[in-house]
Image: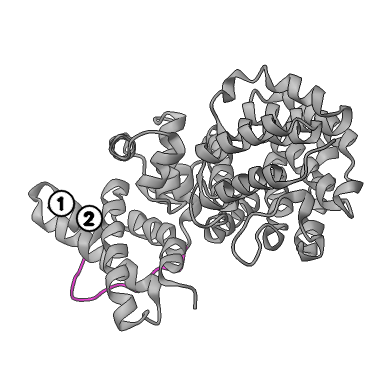
Amino acid sequence: MMPTEDLLRTLAPQVLGAVARRFGDFSAAEDAVQEALFAAAQRWPEYGVPDDPRAWLIHVASRRMTDWLRSDIARRRREAAVAVDDSVEPAAPEQDDTLTLLFMCCHPALTPSSAIALTLRAVGGLTTAEIAHAFVVPEATMAQRISRAKEKIRASGEPFRLPTPEERQQRLRAVLHVIYLIFNEGYASSVGETLQRRDLANEAIRLTRALRAAIPDDGEIAGLLALMLLTDARRLARTGPDNELIPLAEQNRALWDERAIAEGVALISDTLPKGSVGPYQLQAAIAAVHDEAESAADTDWPQILALYDLLRRMSVNPMVELNHAIAVAMVHGPASGLALLDSLDGLSGHYRLDAVRAHLLEMAGSREAAIDHYVRAAAGTTSIPERNYLTTRAARLRSSPRPD
């Protein structure tokens, strides 16, 4: 049995989807589900997890919705329309509405940032504080943004259903971006003591599988699934016994998930030749090159650099530019990579820029400058495992013998 917190994160989007579908009010349903989750967090550790935790949460959230409907005269007509009967609780529906919930959170009435925030909250299970940190805004600001997003969806009057094929296509880019962000937060948590949040990574992979089943011929959906499988395959090797971060070059590749790698490689190999290539497919191809190398020394960096050159032409993204600079350094030497870092204005002040600069300076033998940037990077991250790793790199350089 998984811990209560992880179980609630897993069940939250399923329960929200079921309650929103039943009552037809996404905003109110989200509030009701949050109350149900809070009640479970208080009750289950003391009295035990019920036999059917999903049904328990739906029951409690539905009762909250019923109470709210009855307390508001204007909503009594809706109560009659959904035929809520407290005396006979309906069986918990088995339908998984998470995909419907995902498309609703990416409603065209919302700005991209609001859609991402709402989806991370409703589908990804992140707290408002965690989302605020990811967006670098105060928690109160993010709470207002999410509240306005829910109100816009309610005001749109859109029924809780999967959108039409045409509507799906209009929202697909936003949906894929949101799933990608959920996975990234699971793969490398931006805050806290844990480097990885497996519940979020697993949920992102599950959502992408469901999306691919609904839209099987889309190359970018297949590319995103391949990218996540190939990246998540390294999960067990990324941390040591004390949750310390282990970089890619130092990982024990025997711990990599060969089945996930095989599935990811097969997906991207099948998808790339079929039509137009998108950013997720190219990122998956890069991940495949890393995963297929028997050792770090065997990595085909010229091929990775060529793929990043293609990716840069179709994606204006500072992180892509940062990774491209690393590939340039691995092929043409650290001085070439460092020269590219000077032009990355979009990442000015970001700890990852300092971390990469420190690594390339260390490769170039600029010891003191590398120490300085490792320390700056450590000060800029709120991920404790990343901070410890960067601090350790600086300490090792300080204590290592100076070259003659």
Residue 85 within the magenta-colored segment of the rendering: yes
Q: Residue at x 36, y 46 (%)?
A: 129
Check disc 2 and report its element: helix, strand or loop. helix
Q: Say which quarter of the image contains residue 40.
A: bottom left
Q: Which mark is residue 77?
A: 1
- Residue under label 2, please give it: 81
396 is higher (above) or lower (below) than 193: above
Determine whether, in the image, residue 67 is placed left or right of residue 219.
left
The residue closer to the viewer here, 341 or 142, is 341
Q: Amino acid at mark 1?
A: Arg
Q: Which mark is residue 141?
A: none
Q: Say which quarter of the image contains residue 341.
A: top right
Determine whether, in the image, residue 304 is placed left or right of residue 366.
right
17 is higher (above) or lower (below) than 92: above
Residue 395 within the magenta-colored segment of the rendering: no
For label 1, the crowd category at 10 Å Cα-Cα, with few meaning under 14, some 14 to 19 and many 20 or more, is few
Determine whether, in the image, residue 29 is placed left or right of residue 218.
left
What whole-number distance in Å separates the C-alpha atoms at marks 1 and 2?
6 Å
Q: Residue at x 81, y 60 (%)?
A: 253
Q: Residue at x 65, y 23 (%)?
A: 316
The residue closer to the viewer here, 243 or 391, is 391
Residue 19 seen in the figure: yes
Check disc 1 and report its element: helix, strand or loop. helix
Where in the figure is residue 59, as x and y percent of width and height?
29, 70
Q: Amino acid at mark 2?
A: Ala
